[in-house]
Image (cartoon, coloured by chain):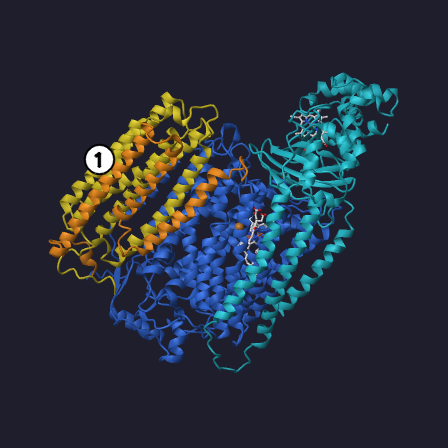
Amino acid sequence: MSDSVDVSKGLPPNPEKATLEGKNKFLGFWVFLGGETIMFATFFGTFLGLREGTAGGPSAEELFSLPLVFLMTMLLLTSSLTSVLAMFSMKKNNFRNMIILTVITVLLGFGFLACEIYEFYEYVHHGGLGFTTSAFGSSFYSLVGLHGAHVTFGLFWFITLMIRYSRTGITLTNAPKFYVASLYWHFIDVVWVFIFTVVYLMSIGGA
Amino acid sequence: MATETAANNNKSVLWDWLTTVDHKKLAVLYLIAGALFFIKAGAMAIFMRIQLMSAENTFLSGQTFNEFITMHGTIMLFLAVTPLIFAFMNFAVPLQIGARDVAFPFVNALGFWIFFFGGLLVSLSWFFGGAPDAGWTAYVPLSSGEYADLGLDFYVLGLQISGLGTLISAINFIVTIINMRAPGMTMMRMPLFCWTGLVTSILIVFAFTPLAAGLALLMLDRIFGGQFFMPDAGGNPVLWQHIFWIFGHPEVYILVLPAFGIISEVVPAFSRKRLFGYTAMVFATLIIAFLSFMVWVHHMFTVGIGPITNSVFAIATMAIGVPTGIKIFNWLFTMWGGKITFNTAMLCASSFVPTFVLGGVTGVMLAMVPVDYLYHDTYFVVAHFHYIVVGGIALGLLAGTYYWYPKMFGHKLNEKLGQLMFWLFYIGFHLTFFIQHILGLIGMPRRVFTYLEGQGMETMNLVSSIGAFMMGAGVVVLLINIVYSAFTSERITVRDPWDARTLEWSTTTPVPEYNFAQTPQVRSLDPWFYEKVHGEGLMKPAEPMDDIHMPNGSILPLTIGLGLFVWGFGMIMLEMANPIITPWIVIGTGVIITFGSMLLHSIHEDHGYHIPLDKIKKIEKEVG
Amino acid sequence: MSDDLSKPFSQSALSHEEILKINRERRIQITAFAFMIFLTLLAFLAVGMEMVEPGFTIPFILLLAVVQFVLQLFYFMHLKDKDHQWPNAFMMTGIVVATPAVIALVLLLGVTKY
Amino acid sequence: MKGRIGLWRFLPLTALFFLLAGCGEDRLTALDPYGPQAQWILDNMILSLYVMALVIIVVFTLFFIAVVKFRRRPGDDEIPKQVEGSKVLEITWTVIPVILLAILAVPTIWGTYYMAEEAPEAAGSSGGEQENAEGEEGEDSGEEPENAEEAEEEGALVIDVTGHQFWWQFDYPDGFSAGNEVYIPTNQKVWFDLSASDVIHSFWVPALGGKIDTIPGVDNSMWLEANEPGVYKGKCAELCGPSHALMDFKVIAMEPEEYEAWEESMTGQEASGEGESSEEEAAEEEQSSGNEGSEEGDTAASEGRQVFEDQGCIGCHAVEGQGTGQGPTLSNFADREKIANVLDVNNENLEGWIRNPDDFKQGNNMPASPDMSDEDMDAIIEFLNSLSAEEDMNQ
Ligand code: HEA
Ligand code: HEA
Ligand code: CUA
Ligand SMILES: [Cu+2]
């Protein structure tokens, strides 16, 4: 049936979709991402709806600092590029390159995460905005925090994959897994585009 | 060739069921779980009806009554009907598209167990100070930490978990239907049940995610002191209502579409006629699905959002009547000119049509905003949706049960008892719910645990309660029938006891583990009927006989579900006054079980096993 | 075939043309990336330096976000490729469903009546 | 055969409406409207019923015929003609419902705006009401849009409504409140500005009009108009806790003159002749002097007032002027038709209520006073029974 691919000539051109299993993973994951859009949309809507509800606490304009957000954006965007490049290496059956690029992706991701933790720490301890301070605080931390949780999950995913398959090279089983993880990572990146625009830039330049 | 043959041959039956990844066995598990939850929620309805039987009755207190309505609604929608439709989807969809299994058998089992443990968590609330009591809609502030107790935490976390299970099962169905169809089974040759299954799954993907988000917000609000909904700190209670109904309205179509699908299978089968206007039916389904995301504000007309919004959403809501009408008339014209056999399955399926129309037209009446100012939150609404969920979905599920029962269990259900059940249920249903329209109009709000004497509501409520008892009797007859038939019905050995039309009837009964020894070649809509009439009476194979690849069973789905259950329970313990163990230990345990199992699964690469050719030949010979 | 599934490959089955094609595509991706960085910079500058007229800032940066969103989806995530109809359909549905939802959560909270 | 069940069920429905409409002594049912809004709703409901009747008749007829005519006789193994579909039919049953829905859409939108009419600007000045009395009459004029302008010139009555678990607070523009019972003049639009203090409730007077939710943090408004004097039952329609079912209220509509008198007795202006003063003592004296009761009754009541204060009741229950928001205002308690909406008015019930309110309304917010001495209880009851505005104005 359809899971019989020609493997005699080497790694097939689209290893992530060479098997039925891979095709299924690929499609299933896209469906999941489709669902994630509306999940994030709900959090975005919540944030936008409650943005003004500062209840006397600090407001967005008072808190946010553009340079830090810019740095974070650059880290994440770049990591997205490296993970794209990793997928090109995968297609060419260049396992070493793929791992190196993925490691870079992960490092950039950790950089991003560190910034975010620093940012939250600052807001809580010096900005006076706790999770429970106001509706603005709650919705801000839950939206950005949800994204941060996705980043964290993505990082652990990459790391597990790399450890698990550190010796095997690219196979028809793990190619879909790497591919799907990289899709996930891009999706996180896409969400961040909206976060920096809607949460940070719009709050600062909003008036 | 890695031919580790079925490893669980010598394991116990119980172990076999706990670790199964076979879609047919999971279907049975879903069926049992769903039926148990249905009986539980139905029994609650009976208690509610006893309380409302007479004015100022004191059978239940206001608090208990609120817990009953909440659990009744929640269980019925999330834990009874959802698994029941999943039972039939699990059983029929792979067979109808000619697949050996679903796309991700492991995920299929995972979905079941997560759903099951989520449901268990909701049900546990009774033992920890009371069930949730804010209605299945859980409107804040009534459901917030300030006004509701632990019960709501069980609601939030239990639904979160079971919703996760539902979500991943839905993804699985989507991929199955898109990727696993047999050769020749184009999208426009798929049976309508597969179409509605696909569309329902898509709706689940896009509706359960906002629910997950909403429940997360509510959980953050209740357990971690979030400020989303309380106006004092800048929050807004209407936010929850939007999120809930963005999910909630599609949810009702999630439930009804598979019922539509079942009707679209049963009616043609017993009218011996192909489905009238197949293409129109498919597109109507898609339009209904699309519109269902654009109408949610019709549950919030009285919130005071403003006249423009209300008007727009009213029109959108009414528009749904058009594609639904297309379906109704197509069913009618399927029967028209056919040769109709009236057995229990067909009785349920055909009576679905007029009953559903009664419920549908009251829906359109509700959509008239200013008049909804009268109907909203009265028994008129209760009557509207029971006409659909009982007169529509429950009848559809009963039809499905009687229809697929022989294929699932190898014997038919008793006809006499079946018809008795049908008439009890059907008459009881009309008695219970028709009169509730009028109750609503004369001023009976819903969710009231009692009503004062002398308001003219006593007789009608009594009638309604009597009807409910009849329905209960009907369900009891069904249960008796199941037991009775298991002992007395003759085994079915033919492939196709109903002389039906779709692929699931082309395999042997009982269905072998691998469904089809050879993947069938599909040449038409209603392929089995086509081969019976135009072909040689058996499906043409699309491939030579060969070893069949099967997935291995695994206990990990169950442990992941268990892990989530423990995790969720730990979260609830954070809210308990004096938990015996530190909640964080419980949470940690749950997290470790969950992620540990997931890790195990991803580390242990399992390629399944092959059933050798000679074994297949032997099995095929045995069943003839 | 399950034994093939966990076996690495010594070589790639890509033909020379296919490798060239992949390299070309990779160049396009890098260009797209550069363009996205540019868009991001523009958005930050628009807000940080108040380059754009105040009333226009929000529509402007939202537009930039949407453009970048499309680029990300279609290039980095390959939605432009032709074997991606189903993924495309699901993302589109997600967006179509999400848009009214966000609008409702922002506007229709009962505080201002529409 | 199932077809017939549905049909004969449906026909009596319309008959039932008229049947039920007759027995509306308690003025609860929406089938017996007493105001232009409720009338509009009923008319349009019946309109939609006709449309639905059409749909139902068509579907049921087709169904009935199909079920009877196309049964398979035993032994008949013929395979019927396999029809694929029909474009013409398909279009027919798309277009006709669209037309029917369009018919319903028009009144829907019109009515939405009709009911969303906002209170005229000059709201709140009660001075206008006197003249209003003759200004507005009849159900018909109630529907006229010009009516709004008319009202605008003269100033409309706007009552603030606050929903509490499980009672209603009505604040009048003139600085006094009423608990659980709201008095309105007949034949004019009365506006309500609604909100809630704790959870969401919903304000509904079936015989007068539609409902609207009262939501903490959100301000809503609606209008109602009664054509006839009388008592109209109101209900809370949104689940709000264990005693949601018992969260009733009453709308008492009076002829405008009468209403005016009531209003004055609540503000205490005319009777005491002390102008704007709403000093506690003055108002209290004025109220008890209104009692036809003897001297003893009078002193007992003022003693009762002392106890009422000592027991802390006054902390939650105002007995004149503005309400506290903690408990229903009792300024006109003696005029209540029910105690806390659930108990018939008599002294035993009142005592029972005060001793342990939770027995009658689970989860309500009034503290129990089981250990209060009998004398104190009697004094409080005496005092509460003296709090009447109606007797005042009848004087
Ligand atoms: C599966 C369940 C299901 C289904 C299918 C529907 C279908 C519909 N529902 Fe229902 N509804 C519920 C379950 C369902 N509903 C539930 C559970 C609630 C209460 C939730 C709660 O508050 O707890 C509810 C509440 C509800 C409300 C809110 C009432 C209120 O609280 O104030 C409204 C308002 O518009 C509504 C409308 C509709 C409409 C227009 C349809 C339409 O889809 C119906 C379309 C069908 C037809 C119209 C019949 C067939 C058509 C023809 C024969 C063609 C010709 C017809 C015409 C021209 C009219 N529903
Ligand atoms: C699929 C959904 C579904 C189904 C099938 C039903 C089925 C029934 N419902 Fe349900 N109902 C809802 C969904 C559903 N309901 C929802 C969503 C609500 C709103 C909740 C809310 O307000 O939040 C609601 C609310 C609701 C109310 C209104 C409560 C209120 O507002 O105060 C009533 C009252 O009559 C009622 C009655 C019934 C009855 C009599 C049945 C019958 O059809 C049930 C028939 C089944 C049985 C009778 C079971 C038989 C089993 C036995 C007899 C075994 C006996 C065993 C023991 C006693 C141990 N329901
Ligand atoms: Cu207040 Cu129900
Ligand atoms: Cu709805």
| Callout 1: chain | A
Q: Residue D143 in the image: x percent, y percent?
A: 70, 44
Q: Quadrant of the N terminus of chain D?
A: bottom right
Note whether residue A74 is visible: yes
Q: Is mark 1 within 8 Å of ligand 4?
A: no
Near-viewer residue (B10 or B591) = B591
What amino acid is found at the position of numbered circle 1 in the picture? Answer: Leu
Judge whether B63 appears above or below A23 on screen. Answer: above
Query: Which chain is represented by blue in the image?
Result: B
Helix, strand or loop status at disc 1:
helix
Q: Residue B408 in the image: x percent, y percent?
A: 43, 65
Q: Residue B276 in the image: x percent, y percent?
A: 48, 70
Note whether residue D336 is visible: no
Query: Which chain is represented by cyan in the image?
Result: D
Dot 1, how many residues are within 10 Å of its Cα: few (below 14), some (14-19), or many (20+)? some
Near-viewer residue (B50 or B209) = B209
Judge whether D283 appears above or below D204 on screen. Answer: above
Residue located beneath label 1 in the image: A107
Query: Which chain is represented by yellow in the image?
Result: A
Residue ID at (30%, 31%): C44
